[in-house]
Amino acid sequence: MNDRTCIVSRERREPDELIRFVVGPDGAVVPDLKRKLPGRGCWVSADRLHVEKAVAKNAFARAFKRQVDVSPHLADQIDQIMVKSALGAVGLARKAGAVALGAAKVDNAVRSGEALCVLHAMDASQDGVRKITQARRATAHLGGPEIHAYKLFSEAELSLALGGTNVIHAAVLAQEAGKAAEKRLVALDRYRGGSPEDQAMFAAIAEDETAAEDME
């Protein structure tokens, strides 16, 4: 089997689309999200569904060709690791001045094209999310960047990570620290299955642009 082939789907993928696993000294399967741990590894597509299937189907034992200890909560453990990593990166971006807080500042960052992505608290109001979504849609329609939005954390988690109170909306800005944070947000979003709303919105924009080109 190719080193970068998912042990569940048998599909070959790029490293960022996979999670590497190794066996620890105690025989337990350990996620190696940074791909730096020593030893022979195996790979699973970087989403919760495939991790859960790998656990249920005893795929790790077959991949490592030995009996291994696999936690039934492995998928949850990976989610927790990714959340900690993403929030830590967002916090560092905030300290570097690469995060804008509050609906008004987020709206401005989106419309100016400075925002790499937007964060909404899980408990954000529909009205607040709708207004920023309109700004994202308008920016994309005018030829600006496609700025994705993520609902990955609670208000309490965002507030703690960003050193604020009642943090409901935030924009990660196009700076080096912001890019590092966005990478971890994308990974967590992919692991959780992605945002159907975002995918639908940008697909609709692409269809509108194609239709407009056909009419010219």
Image (cartoon, rainbow, N blue to C red):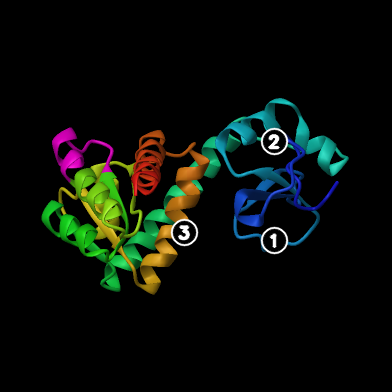
For residue 37, the mark is 1
Left or right of residue 154: residue 195:
right
Magenta residues, as a range?
121-131
Q: Amino acid at mark 2?
A: Val
Residue at the image position 64 percent from the left and 49 percent from the top: 19
Front position among marks 1 and 3: 3
Picture quadrant of residue 196: top left
> Which residue position holds label 2?
70
Closer to us: 53 or 129:
129
In the image, residue 178 above or below residue 160: below
Tell me the amino acid under the disc marked 1.
Leu
Is 168 rendered above or below residue 60? below
Q: Is residue 106 left or right of residue 3?
A: left
Left/right placement of residue 201 relative to residue 61 reads left
Q: Is residue 168 visible in the rendered structure shown here?
A: no
Between label 3 and label 2, give the one nearer the viewer. 3
77 over 148 or under it: above or below = above
Queried whether the magenta region covers residue 129, the answer comes back as: yes
Identify residue for label 3: 183
Residue closer to the observer: 113 or 34: 113
| Image location of residue 22, percent across then percent down | 73, 50
Give the mark nearer the N terminus: 3 vs 2: 2
Residue 183 colored in magenta in the image: no
Three-letter code for the amino acid on which mark 3 is drawn: Lys
- CA distance for labels 2 and 1: 17 Å
Residue 45 position, x and y percent, is 65, 42
First of labels 1, 3 by sequence position: 1
| Residue 183 x, y percent position in the rendering | 46, 59
Mark 2 or 1, nearer chain start:
1
Q: Residue at x 56, y 36 (%)?
A: 48
